[in-house]
Structure formats: C-alpha cells, structure tokens
Amino acid sequence: MSAESLSLFQQSSLTINERGAFADISPSMPPSDALPPRVGPSPMLGSYFSQVDDPRPGFWETSEYMLGHVGVLVVFVESNGGLDPDLENWQEWRMNLVMRKVRSGLDWWVARYPFHSPPLEFKISSAVGYTRYEPITRNSTDESLWIPEVLASINCGSGENYYIYAASCANEIREKWSTDWAFLIFVVDSLKDEDGMFADPPRFAYAYINGPFMVITYDNDDWGIDRMDLVVAHEVGHIFGATDEYNGEKENSGYLYEPDSDGSRCIMDGNAGPCISVGTQRQIGWIDDDLDGYPDILENEPVIIIEEKPPNITDNESIKLEGVVKLDPYPCRRPYCRSVTINKVVPINYTGMIYALDGKFDSAFEKFLLVYNASAAGRHQVSVSFSEAIKNLVASYSQTVLYTYVLVSDSRGPEFERVDVGSTQTVEYRLKWAHDESAVTSGNVLINGVLAENRGDGWFGVTITKNDVDAVTINVDSVNVTLRTSEGQAVIRKYVVTTHPVNIIFDRVNIDLSSPKARFDVDSLAEISYRAYYEYDHRDFVGSIRLNQPLRQSNVGKYTYTVVGIDDEQYGLKSFKSNSVDIIFDKVLITLRTPRERIDTGLTAPVIIDARYAYDYQRFSGQVFLSSPLTQTTTGKYTYRAVAISDEKYGLSKFETNEVEVIFDRIVINLSAPPRVQVGKTAPISYTAHYEYDGEKFSGKIIFNRDVSSSRIERASFTVSEITDDLYGLRSFVSNEVIVIFDSIIHDLRVDTYAPFIARTVISLNYLSDNAPITGAEVSLNGESMSEEEPGRYRLDKIVFSPIIDIEIVAKTQNFDPYIVEGYELMIGNIALYVGLVALALVLAMRRALKKRERTKNS
C-alpha cells in the first residue's frame, strides 16, 4: 500500500468526557512490554542541559505526564522487499480499522480524565513508512534497523540511532501541531504471521517509559485486532510513565516517581478492568493532593526575573523593561529528570505594549519586552503582571521612572539674518528641564559642534564666524547634562527644540563696476555704473556704495576707481568685494594752422587741423567742427577756431584750440570800353582792379575772355576770364562786362543845289551793324565843320558860286578811322544862272565834274 493512502499530519482530535469501556480481557500482556528510556550520547543532549532554568519540556521530555494536548502519529510499517521477503502488505480497510482502535484506546484515557483544566486532548494522524525489512519476521530488538528507515521515508526526525530518531520525530510533531507532548505508534503488520508476535523476545506490543514511541502488531497475539484498543490504552500508560502492575514488583516511575499498585486489576494490570489504579494515576501525574480541582503538577507560581530594567531617570520616551517570566515547575522526583511544566504564562496587566520575544506567550518560559511610550515628560509608573493559565496565580513588577529631556525653548542671535563674512556672531540657546521647566545649570552642550559656554539662567552660547559666504543654521547638536533628583542622577542627552533655529547668512555684497567708455571729458562726471548683489543668493543689493575718489576730475590723467564703502539699507552689511575700473579723463588738443592767409572767395580755406588726445598724445579719431565754414563766398577776414568735436573713439567733447585767420578775397575788376570799334581795330578796353578786402591795388595780370579785335561786324562781349595775382596768388575775381560792337560806317549823302549860290549838304552817318545813328562825330565838309541837326544827321549850308561844288566830307568818331566821302554836285541854281553866261565854261566844268566824280567812285 502506498504512503499516500494515509498522509502524515492529517490530525483528528479526541476529547471525550464520557466513560468508555473495553470488552472482556482474557489474554495476558506480554512480559517486559515497558522498556526503560534509551538515552545515550547525542548532540541533542546539549539542548537538554541548556534548559536547566527553562521549565518548558525539552527534547527528551516528550511525554512526562498525561495532561494537556498530545500529538500521536500512527505509523504503518510497510516492507518493500528490499532486503527481507515482502510477506505482509497493508490494505486500506485494515489501516482504517487500526485507526479506529487507536482512537478508541486513546479515548479510554480521555473518558477517565479527572480535571476540567487543562483538558486532555489527543491529536492523531497517520502515515505509511517503508523499510527493506519485514519486521514481524525478526526479533523485536531489530527495531533499531527498520525504525530509522521508516521515519526517513516519511521525512520525520533525524538522529544517529533509532531512539533519537524517534524522539526527534516526536519533537517535530509537537512543534508542528503545537501540542504539549507527542509520541509515535509503530503498527507492524502480522496478518500472515502465525502468532502475531516478534520472534525473540516474543512480544506483540511494547512501549518505552515516558516515550517516545510504542510498537504494536496487527493481531496482537491472542488479543486480536478487536481488542487492539485495550493494548493501545495499556501502552499509552507506559508512554506517560506508568509501570506494569502484573509483574509482582512494586516499581516507582513517572514524573513524581510514585510506586505502582501491583495487582490492581486495572488498566496496567494484565487482565485489566476498566479502571486506573491510584498508583498509575500518581505515576502519570493525575494528582490533586490539595483538593482544589487542579492537577498539582500544573499549580505553578509565576516568577518575574527583570534582566534589564529602565533607569529611574531616563530621556528615552520609549521606556523598555526586559525580563523573563517563568513558572516554577512542580519538582520532578524521578532520578535524573528535569522539572518541567506545560502550564503557560499570560500577561494580564501592563503599561504600554508587551511582546513575547519568541512571538507568542504560549509556554511556561517567556522572554518578554515591555515598551511604554511616555507621552509627556514627568514621572511614569511602569508595571507588568503575569498569571499562569491554570489557576490564575499572579506575579507583578512595578517601577517609577522619571522621563525627562532638555527643552531648548528660546534662542537669540544677531539682529539681522545676514551678517558680514568674517564677522564674529554670538548665538545662544536657553535650556530647561522638560518635566518642571527649571533651568539647566550645567553640563556640556554642543552648538554646531562647538562646546557652548554657560551664560547662566539656562543660556548656553557660542561664537560663530565664517570666512566664506555661506548660510549657517546654528542648532543645538547635542546635550550631555546631569540631572540630580531625589530618584538619583542621570546623564540626559535627549533634547527637543521648540524654538526656531538661528539662521545666519554670512554674506557680502559683490559689486561689479563698469563704465560704458574708457575716457571721459575732464571736468565732466564719469559714468560708472554698478551691479551690486548679495553673494549668497544673488539678490539685488539694497543700498548705496562709496567710491574712492570723485567722479569729476579737472586734470587729464588715468584714475582708478574702486569701492571703499557701502551702506546696506536692508541688512547693514559692511563687507563687500569690488572690482576696479580705470577711467581716463581727457581732452582733445587742437592746433590749427594755414599755409596761406589770403585765399580766393568760394574756395576752401587750407586750415590744417592737428588734433590729439591730451592723455597719450595719440591722434584724435573723429571730427572737428570749426567756427566758420572753410568755404566763404563773401570777402572778409574770418577767424577759425574749433567749436565742437565728434570723437568717434571715446566720445569726448572737451577740447582746447587755437585760432587762425584767413582772408577770403577777390579781385574787383572794372572794365571800360567804347561801345563801338571799327572792324579790324583793337578794342581799346581799359580796366581798374583792386583787392576787394582792403581796396589795395591789384598787382597782376588779367586775361580777357576773347580777342580784343574782330575782322567782322559783330556784337562782342568782353569780360575777364582769368587773372594772375602776383601778390597773393588769388584766382577769384569779379569783373563787369563790356559790350563792344565791331562795326563799319555807312552814310546817306544829300546835296541840295537848287538854290542859287547855296549848297545844302546833309549826310546821315549810321553804323552798319544796326543802322544806329552815329552821334557826336566830328564831321567836316571840305574842311568846314558840319553841325548835327539830328542824331547822326549832319548839315552844312555852304555858299557856292561855282556851278559845281566839290564835296569832301570827313567824319571822325572815336575808335574809327576818319570816314571820307568825296564827290561833287552841280549847283543847279548857279548853273541855271550861268547857263547862258558860260555855256562853254559849263560844258568844261561839267566835264571836269564828271571826271572828278569818276575818281570819287573809284576811291
């Protein structure tokens, strides 16, 4: 049958209070079925001896007395043919039958249990364990061979021999099932065996006194499966220390090492009846000698052992009390046994929170931690009370603890949060006791790592300095003060700050001076701007700065400006850091000169400007504006000086200048000429010339705009086109214009000879170009002056007696050669008069006249 058919640790509980009964008992129990414990050398013994002061059952105490909760593991031993022939095989129905019988055997004890508290309860489970051996065919002592294999197959326990292996498995069951005791029942299949007994010694059931296991066979010799419950009940008595009462020997056994009642005819006697003898009851721990209804073994006084108690004065609000509470076990009287109890301690009254250090108060020995959190400074009662779980016996512990600490209640520091870098500042904190608010009068107080000075009345102070810009929060770092009271004295290190920390910013003002230009005019204000900010957080400085020298300088030179002081309106700081700026106060030196003192009007005066910066005599870069334009169209003396400058390099406007004088002048030329000049003649043009500025006579030459003569009739305009000034080299002039008509003379001659002896000669003289009359001319007729009766018309009445008049008119006008008109005219009146007289003479005269006329024409 497989191990899965009945699984390990599937528990069932038996808590039966009705009295049970067995069938009639006729066979006898086998001799020597109660075996003594086999405690040999084992590593596990170390834990046994380490539990001397611990009343909880240990490794070897798996079933000291029949009280409380008991774990029972029924192990069906199954051979697998690995070594011995596989003769026996379990069937499930038979294993179920065995389990019913086992439960019945355990129930027999539960039904006769005499106490109400604690109850007797069996928790049962089963498993199938395998071995290479067939146990029923072997001696009972061969249990040492097959028990380790069986337990290993169900993975329960460990150890160097079968007994320790079984004890280890029982301890595992007790721990996993949370019972007080545990033992094993090995059921060996004997269905096919003739007598249902082991070979030698001939046993069918046996158990070790006080555990950890029993061995029974399936059919139990003549008892058979039907009465297995009685066999189990009998062996359970051995498990809890009861001895056989059918062997004729009085034996002491059990936790109390009591004698049995041999021949009692009860459960531990061979042919037992349904009873438990007094001896057996005392051996298994069922005693109540004080008749209080509780088992005497579990009437255990609790004992509180304080291992670490809190000091009477503490600064730790978490007040801790550590200790052990244990029950004083009823003494075990069996030789070499250890006194144990399964009773449990229970905390019933306590201040704060209480903790079992193993996680749960569930045994007779508990290390505990009491944590009381003091809500306020003052005296606190710390207490704890434990009882045991059966009879409610109580043990208590109480202690008064003064919980206090240092209260940092006030502070004082500099007036402003910001102070100068490098300055020394005093910071103080006031300390008082939290429980009564009295001043702390002595002790060591560290403020920012510095041992503070006791200033009295609870004030402790330090001086702080910082050479770098930084924000410093000055706090109390630690206190180490001694409090002395009626409870004693204690060093207090805890402190609580209820005041604001003192924050100090060691700061300075960073000032960045700058100027928009490098040079300024002397006697002007230098433009120096600055950006000032607090170095710690770069916030703008609120205040003013002071420079090392005035911003206005009257002398040319380089001046270095830096900050020599500040006035901080916000924090009152005095510390600052500033750069320097160099400012050159300068002006432009302007020297004017000219190579010519007199120049032509309309030209640009040759004023040479030499401008230099006074500071370094470098050439000026910019423009110089003079007092007058360099070009003048009006004659006069002009004084030049610089009146303004435009400095492209430095923006200066201040300058020094000299003056130069320049005469703008020209030649004033007045031309004069006759209005008409005979063609081919040189026009007699004359002039006067002087310097317009001062009227001085011009010294030089003039050149006309054209030739002063002309071979043709024309209207000629004459002016000066160029001059040569020998004195000043001027070229500018002003000249009038003269008009000269190059012309010829024409005439119209009329001679009236009709009147006797009168020759009226009229000649009209005109210019050929425009037929303008020639006036004012000197005109003569045959040497006799003619008069100008009208402009350009000249007349002469001449007395002539001859019949012919010779005419020679000479006209003289300025700039013309004499104009001669020659001819003759018949004196008609005279001729008429003399016709008759001198015909011949007339003819001759006429001939002569004709010849003469001919000559005139030829000329």
Image (cartoon, helix red, strand yellow):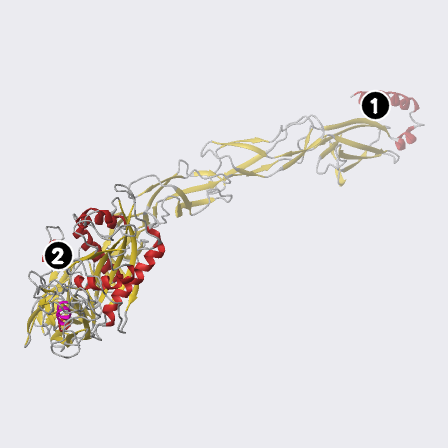
Can residue 706 be seen here? The reply is: yes
Distance between mark 2 and mark 1 Cα atoms = 210 Å
- Taking the magenta stretch, the answer to whether it contains residue 768 is no
Number of marks drawn: 2
Q: Which residue is mark 1?
A: 853
| In the depicted structure, whether residue 45 falls above or below residue 451 | above
| In the depicted structure, whether residue 597 falls above or below residue 855 | below
At label 2, counting other C-alpha atoms closer than 10 Å, the crowd grade (few under 14, some 14-19, many 20 or more) is some
Residue 49 percent location from the top left of the image: 9, 57
Question: In the visual, does 528 lie left or right of 668?
Answer: left
At label 1, counting other C-alpha atoms closer than 10 Å, the crowd grade (few under 14, some 14-19, many 20 or more) is some
Q: Give the residue type that dot 1 points to.
A: Arg
Residue 604 percent location from the top left of the image: 47, 39
Q: Residue at image x 47%, y 41%?
A: 664
Can residue 417 be seen here? The reply is: no
User: Which one is earlier in the sequence, the residue at label 2 or at label 1?
Assistant: 2
* Observer-nearest of 589 and 628: 589
| Region in magenta | 278-283
Q: Which residue is mark 2?
A: 37
Quarter in which the C terminus is drawn: top right
Residue 844: mark: none
Q: Give the residue type that dot 2 points to.
A: Pro
SS at circle 2: loop
* Observer-nearest of 809 and 529: 529
* The image quarter in which residue 797 lies: top right
SS at circle 1: helix
For discs 2 and 1, the disc positioned in front in the rendered view: 2
* Observer-nearest of 323 and 625: 323
Q: Residue at image x 81%, y 33%?
A: 748
Residue 496 percent location from the top left of the image: 18, 69
Question: In the visual, does 465 lie left or right of 83?
Answer: left
